[in-house]
Image: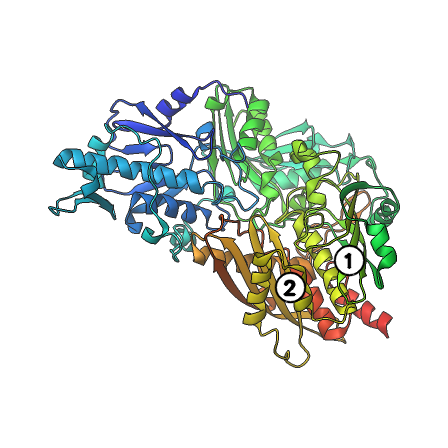
Amino acid sequence: MTNSMDRRSFLKKSAACAGLMLAVSLSGFPPILAAEKRTDTGNNQWIPNAWLRMTPDGVVTVLINKSELGQGTWTGLAMLVADQLDMDWKDVRVEASPVRDEYKDPIFGMQLTGGSTGIRNMYDTMSKAGAAAREMLISAAASEWKVPIGECLAQKGNVTHQKTGKTLSYRQLCSQAAKVPVPQNPPLKPRDQFQFIGKNMPRLDMFDKVNGKPVFGVDVFVPGMLYSSIERPPAYGAKLVSFDKAAAEKVPGVQKVFTVPEGVAVVATNIESAWKGRKALNAKWDLGSMPDLNDTSLQRIFMDHMRKKGLVTKNVGDVEQAFKKASQRMMSVYSAPYVAHAAFEPQNCTADVRPDSCEIWCPTQAQTSALNVAMKETGLPADKITIHTTMLGGGFGGKVEVKVVEEAVMISRTVGKPVKHIWSRKEDFNNDCFRPGSLHMIEGGLDDKGVPVLWRHKVVVSPIMERLLPAMVKGGIDPTAVDGIANMDYSMPNLYVEYVKLDLPIPVGFWRSVGNSSNTFVVESFIDEMAHGAGKDPLEFRLNMLKENPRAAGVLKKVADAGGWSNPAPKDIGRGIAVRFSYGSYVAQMAEVSVDKKTGVIKVHRMVSAIDPGQVVNPDSVLAQIEGATIMAISVALKERVSFKNGGVATSSFSDYPILTMSEIPRIEGHIITNNEKIGGVGEPCVPPVAPAIANAVFAATGLRLRSLPMTADKVRSAFKAKA
């Protein structure tokens, strides 16, 4: 990224405060603390570092560089600061940080929310920011009382001299603390002294959300702003042939109509007029780059690619020899569809571009990417661009994409006024970067004792990283394509994994748990097939393969015990189980389902979940993420699928993309296993085991092995018919 403002200038301009600013450099991990002198600008705030500020009333506001999508990251990160700073929780507030180098994730090297890294990547940085401020306050108090620092204790917004009982509040100490040298490596409180971390803490954004106070992207209003929409090609690669500009300009409220790289932009005084103007364009397009693309042709394309030679991504042992010696051999074909992000808040962005500045309001997961496209589109340096990260009405990886930001900035620059750019629901579906569809062929073998001796797996799937993070692609292999396969949790003496790259115009991107989502369905379902082929209990079969992976075995045992696996299932109920390690955490899921043989409808009655994420910051948020991820994963397992027709996306609304309704949500039980292991992620790891647990439960209930997602009633009825 090109940035005309150096670090020192940024720090001087980023906050007005008295005394000292402590800058946390994110060039290393753990962070390095460096001091910088400031002059008093008269606003009476103390800003001990880039991550927090204290006002005269003793309230501390923590600046968060991660997006809040409802996952609780803002509260969790504030807990880290508040615990080390020894604050009273009622005096803690949060807000989005600026988009600047100072706030880049130390692991990613950019401001980005994804990969279940919101807390685990920032744990050390935020803890040390709070600890450094605490040590400065203690030092200031000790200096005031002329006593040793070791005799002073910080607690709930005050510093106390333990021998005399003298107390000074943080707000009383701010001016003196600003003169204290910045500790380069402040001591962190041990776990047994935490007052917040590891305990259920109320979400800092909860009450405001209940009262409708937070500003989401679609809520932004800028005086004098216009609204814009773009008429886009109906098929991938389609070129614009003609459009009626005059007709669109006659629509009341329409202010300007002009072509853009994506199609034709219509700008109006309100969004309804912009949409009516689009319709009046009567745009004509050619057939596109792949006019015959549809659901049927896609199946054929996948099968054709399955016959091609792929890239070997894993080759352990000798699969060919093991296959010859195996007492029992089995083979299955699995598939997963393209899936949309389907966030309730569609893509949107408000931009105000002027000759010498640019201001942006957007619900984004990728602030640095948004800044980069704004710089490219406007030609302005980073210090002339301000990005406000609003609350997000869902993201799931979809709001890592910044096309909507690029479009909003381009349109505002063209019309010379602030513009709110909103995608319609149809646009949101038609222009999404989906979870890629995939086709899998697996061969397995058991020895004469029913022990797995080989696994050969071939997967056909489109690459994600080639577009988003090309440096992650090594030797032509996209790591997301084989995540959960080449690095499966089980010990397998002979393992061969082959990846066939699928090139299609359908854009694919990050979707909650990425490759693990579909790959775990395949792996855990086939593990179940092998268990039944061996005549063994699916749980015991797995545990025997996890003797070298005790944490994976631990979550399996937890859900089995909590779910009553060893007890007979209720009448007409099948139980299924699955496990997966992803994003630093181990998760197991157990499903209890029934199947209506007449309608084919699968009903999930109960989901028992267990997660081992190592250390836990806010257990309440972890349980909420277990519940949310499980609900989303059930929806995808049973219902969600993007359809294609005439070279483009046929899916256009929730009427043809059904999601799980409230009446269909089962009883969900969440269990957390904590330990001293490195902190893991939470938002994504709970998704992968859900679909296979349900599929395995369906088999237990009916004897039907469903190998294609989603597991719709039509597929179940067809399976019953074929079985008969």
Task: List x then y, in percent, for residue 469.
Answer: 65, 34
Task: List x then y, in percent, for residue 669.
Answer: 53, 67
Residue at left offset 52%, top offset 64%: 670
Q: 10 Å neighbourhood of mark 1: few (<14), some, or many (≥20)?
A: many
Labels 2 and 1: the sequence-earlier one? 1
Which residue is at the front of the view, 442 or 659? Answer: 442
Name which residue type carries label 2. Leu
Task: List x then y, in percent, for residue 15.
Answer: 34, 28
Residue at left offset 27%, top offset 33%: 46
Which residue is at the front of the view, 358 or 695? Answer: 695
Task: List x then y, in percent, for residue 223.
Answer: 45, 34
Which residue is at the front of the view, 653 or 610? Answer: 610
Name which residue type carries label 1. Val
- Residue 337 visible somewhere in the drawing: yes
Q: Which mark is residue 453?
A: 1
Q: Identify the image quadrant of residue 568.
A: bottom right
Q: Identify the image quadrant of residue 557.
A: bottom right
Q: Which quadrant of the figure contains the C terminus?
A: bottom right
Total numbered badges shown on the rendered structure: 2
Q: How is the image coloured?
A: rainbow
Which secondary structure, mark 1?
strand
- Residue 659 visible somewhere in the drawing: no
Q: Is residue 455 above or below residue 600?
A: above
The residue identified by callout 2 is 543
Residue at left offset 65%, top offset 41%: 276
- Real-space Cα separation, disc 2 to disc 1, in angstroms: 15 Å
Which secondary structure, mark 2?
helix
Residue at left offset 41%, top offset 49%: 75
Q: 10 Å neighbourhood of mark 2: few (<14), some, or many (≥20)?
A: some
